[in-house]
Image (spheres, grey):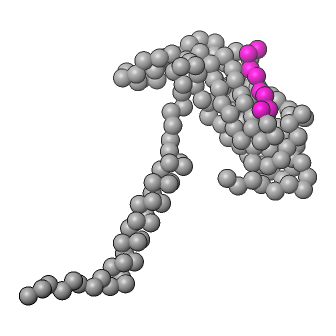
Amino acid sequence: MSERRRKRSIFDLMSEYMEEFEALADELIEGTFAERPSWNTESCCLEPLCNVFVTPDEVVITVDLPNTEHETLKVEALSEDLIEITARMKRKMRFADFGITHREGEFSSFRCQTRVPVSVDTKRMKISFKHGILEIRFQRKRGHEIKVE
């Protein structure tokens, strides 16, 4: 007596496809939004907290740079939509200063790169640094839409 192969229903097939789709979507999301450390022990730098605020007339970028030597602060437009900020610290920080005992390394500078989501005039940026907070203001170019990544 031969066994009959059971036909799979359309619902079973759809369920399998949906499980595969969900697994692929989860993998893609993890790869895209994976967190990374905010330090680089090779270059001895920390990545500071940064915020980009877009208004109808301007873009304001604020960066938290505590314990920074004002004279070493450098803001550079790498391209039309990418800004790099670097600064040296007044004193070196170690992982132990943050209460982290299972890692070794020390940091002597800050470095971050941030994208500007709209077209701005990078030649006319206004920079102010007060109480460890860096503020960079850019005038928006007229007639350009926000870039969504």
- Is residue 58 visible to us here? no
Residue sitting farthest toward the top: 91
**Quarter of the figure that contains the N terminus:** bottom left
| Magenta stretch contains residue 74 | yes
How far from the left and from the top, in percent, is residue 53?
A: 74, 46
Q: Is 51 in the magenta?
A: no
Q: Vertically, is 87 above or below 54?
A: above
Q: Is residue 30 above or below residue 86?
A: below
Q: Observer-nearest residue: 91 or 131?
A: 91
Residue at x 75%, y 34% (from the top left corner):
83
Quadrant in the picture for residue 48: top right
Q: Which residues are magenta?
A: 71-78
Q: Position of residue 68 (x, y in %)?
A: 67, 18
Q: Position of residue 121 (x, y in %)?
A: 88, 40
Q: Residue at x 50, y 45 (%)?
A: 34
Q: Nearer the viewer, residue 10 or 51?
A: 10
Horizontally, residue 7 falls left or right of residue 40, namely: left
Q: Quadrant of residue 133?
A: top right
Quarter occupied by residue 3: bottom left
Between 99 and 23, the one nearer to me in the picture: 23
Q: Main secondary structure of the magenta part?
A: strand
- Which residue is drawn at the image coordinates 62% and 34% (left, top)? 49
